[in-house]
Image: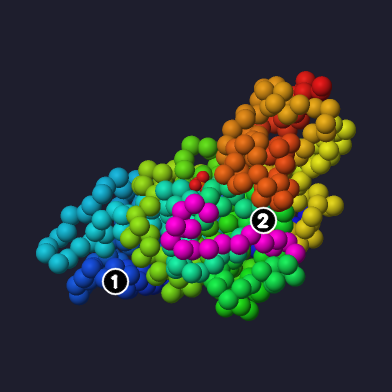
């Protein structure tokens, strides 16, 4: 399954990395009006950067690669030349000593820039095929920074199955500042087209969306957005760049709750944003520094570490998910299964054309002869918990958990019923997982 030409081409080498760094200095200068860059600082910064992080040209060319499985391990900024450490050090510092008045090493203050965070930002930019990445303290902090690009009177079009926290952010926070939003069915392109009003400035979609796994045609939506002169923003949390790269499908901004598959071990909260366009990069760099919701050095390190195993984890997640979806589909107690990897799922073909496969998230409903509360309390291996994308399998009840902040009528109109169960399939042995699901379904019979 999946599109046959889904090939990653690694393109970060020492020269482009240094060129990007130089651009970064120019950007920072442009963004931070209070920052005075003195002659020579750019050069000092580049030398420092090169000396500290980048392996010698020879070593680096030996580490060149063509595939994303290698990029997750060697991508972005790799290694530490000072010590030869193969892992990016944790620069647990808030500030940096300046060599002389009016000079610095390229790093001044860790809200503005930190080497460990910079390594993560370069890595996610490379994996998503963007030009700049930004790391935040959570997925919602990343989305907050992205939404801060807009102004009072602007309107955002949201896909109908959006993550509850994104809805709440627009509905209860940005609303106070006059940023409006409308929910529209982005899976139906005619409905989507009709939702455009004069004040729309961006479209924010998830595909597959949370929690019904509805698939939106990201190429078409980005094309329509651009036709209307607005930005296309994609939340790629459920797929990760290993399975889907929205910037290559025409999106302008990709956001992630890196808390999920990218971190992969349910041990950190983090968010990422990636863009291609230099102007957008400069505006986001400004917002990241100005609003300050940055990811700390230790969590940046943990996230880099998590991303190294993204390829093997995702392969196993998806293999398990295919088996779990088939199991649920065949179980007579299960009324509906939502999983974009099933050939009769909504958007199956569209998903195949834009992603490697259907991912590892699914939702399902038990029939009226089963009690959902008993089902949840009977699970022994699979934990009832918020979140997803960790190595351990988790279930959740969207109506009272992840999507509780969406009013009931909007939730139900979108198909998020009180009986819906969301399953994040982990990488445990699939037979153990299926046995756990089977016994909990049996116990929940009424
Ligand atoms: C699709 C999606 N986007 C964004 C978020 C928010 O991310 P975080 O919890 O890291 O703030 C979540 C969290 O569950 C999510 O599922």
Q: Residues within 10 Å of mark 1 (few under 14, many from 20)?
A: some
Along the line of sight, which residue is nearer the eye, 35 or 88?
Answer: 35
Percent x, y of residue 49: 32, 61
Q: What residue is drawn where x is 42% and y is 48%?
A: 137
For the question of whether residue 320 can be seen, the reply is no
Using the image, tell me which numbered label, if any, was put on residue 194: none
Instruction: Describe residue 173's horizontal placement relative to residue 162 as left or right.
Output: left
Disc 1 and disc 2: Cα gap in Å?
Answer: 39 Å
Q: What residue is drawn where x is 15% and y is 60%?
A: 99
Disc 1: residue Cβ within 8 A of ligand 1's nearest atom: no
Percent x, y of residue 293: 38, 52
Q: Which residue is mark 2?
A: 160
Instruction: Describe residue 384's horizontal placement relative to residue 141 as left or right.
Output: right
Along the line of sight, which residue is nearer the eye, 439 or 17?
Answer: 439
Task: Give the magenta part as a residue range.
Answer: 171-188
SS category of the residue bearing label 1: helix
Instruction: Describe residue 73's horizontal placement relative to residue 3 as left or right.
Output: left
Q: What residue is drawn where x is 39% and y is 70%?
A: 282
Percent x, y of residue 281: 43, 68
Does the segment drawn in magenta span residue 175?
Answer: yes
* Label 1 vs label 2, nearer the camera: 2
Does the segment drawn in magenta span residue 256?
Answer: no
Location of residue 231 with respect to 205 vertically, above or below: below
- Proximity of marks 1 and 2: CB atoms separated by less than 8 Å: no
Locate the C terminus by quadrant: top right
SS category of the residue bearing label 2: loop
Percent x, y of residue 320: 72, 39
Q: Residues within 10 Å of mark 2 (few under 14, many from 20)?
A: many
Dividing the picture into quadrants, the one containing residue 241 is: bottom right
Q: Which residue is mark 1?
A: 29
For the question of whether residue 49 can be seen, the reply is yes
Q: Does label 1 or label 2 sit earlier along the sequence?
A: 1
């Amino acid at each position: 399954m999946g599109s046959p030409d889904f090939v990653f081409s690694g393109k970060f080498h020492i020269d482009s990395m240094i060129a990007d760094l130089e651009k970064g200095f120019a950007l920072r200068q442009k963004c931070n009006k209070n920052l005075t860059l003195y002659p020579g600082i750019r050069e000092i910064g580049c030398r420092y950067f090169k000396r500290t992080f980048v392996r010698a040209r020879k070593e680096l060319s030996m580490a060149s690669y063509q595939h994303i499985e290698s990029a997750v391990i060697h991508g972005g900024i790799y290694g530490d030349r000072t010590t030869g450490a193969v892992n990016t050090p944790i620069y647990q510092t808030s500030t940096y000593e300046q060599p002389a008045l009016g000079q610095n090493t390229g790093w001044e203050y860790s809200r503005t820039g930190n080497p460990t965070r910079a390594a993560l930002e370069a890595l996610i930019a490379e994996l998503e095929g963007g030009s700049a990445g930004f790391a935040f303290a959570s997925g919602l902090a990343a989305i907050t920074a992205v939404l801060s690009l807009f102004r009072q009177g602007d309107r955002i079009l949201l896909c109908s199955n959006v993550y509850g926290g994104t809805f709440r952010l627009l509905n209860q926070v940005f609303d106070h500042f006059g940023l409006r939003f409308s929910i529209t069915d982005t899976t139906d392109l005619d409905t989507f087209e009709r939702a455009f009003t004069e004040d729309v400035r961006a479209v924010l979609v998830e595909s597959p969306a949370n929690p019904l796994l509805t698939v939106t045609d990201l190429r078409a939506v980005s094309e329509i957005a651009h036709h209307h002169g607005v930005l296309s923003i994609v939340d790629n949390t459920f797929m990760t760049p290993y399975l889907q790269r929205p910037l290559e499908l025409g999106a302008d901004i990709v956001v992630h709750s890196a808390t999920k598959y990218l971190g992969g071990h349910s041990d950190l909260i983090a968010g990422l944003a990636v863009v291609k366009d230099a102007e957008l990069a400069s505006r986001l760099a400004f917002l990241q520094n100005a609003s300050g919701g940055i990811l700390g050095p230790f969590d940046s390190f943990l996230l880099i570490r998590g991303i190294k195993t993204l390829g093997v984890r995702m392969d196993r997640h998806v293999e398990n998910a295919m088996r779990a979806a088939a199991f649920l589909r065949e179980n007579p107690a299960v009324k509906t299964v939502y999983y974009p990897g099933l050939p009769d799922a909504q958007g199956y073909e569209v998903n195949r054309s834009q992603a490697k496969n259907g991912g590892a998230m699914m939702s399902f409903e038990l029939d009226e002869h089963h009690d959902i509360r008993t089902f949840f309390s009977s699970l022994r291996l699979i934990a009832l918990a918020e979140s997803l994308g960790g190595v351990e399998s988790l279930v959740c009840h969207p109506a009272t958990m992840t999507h509780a902040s969406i009013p009931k009528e909007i939730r139900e109109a979108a198909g998020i019923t009180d009986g819906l169960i969301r399953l994040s399939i982990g990488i445990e042995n699939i037979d153990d997982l299926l046995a756990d699901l089977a016994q909990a379904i049996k116990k929940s019979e009424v």
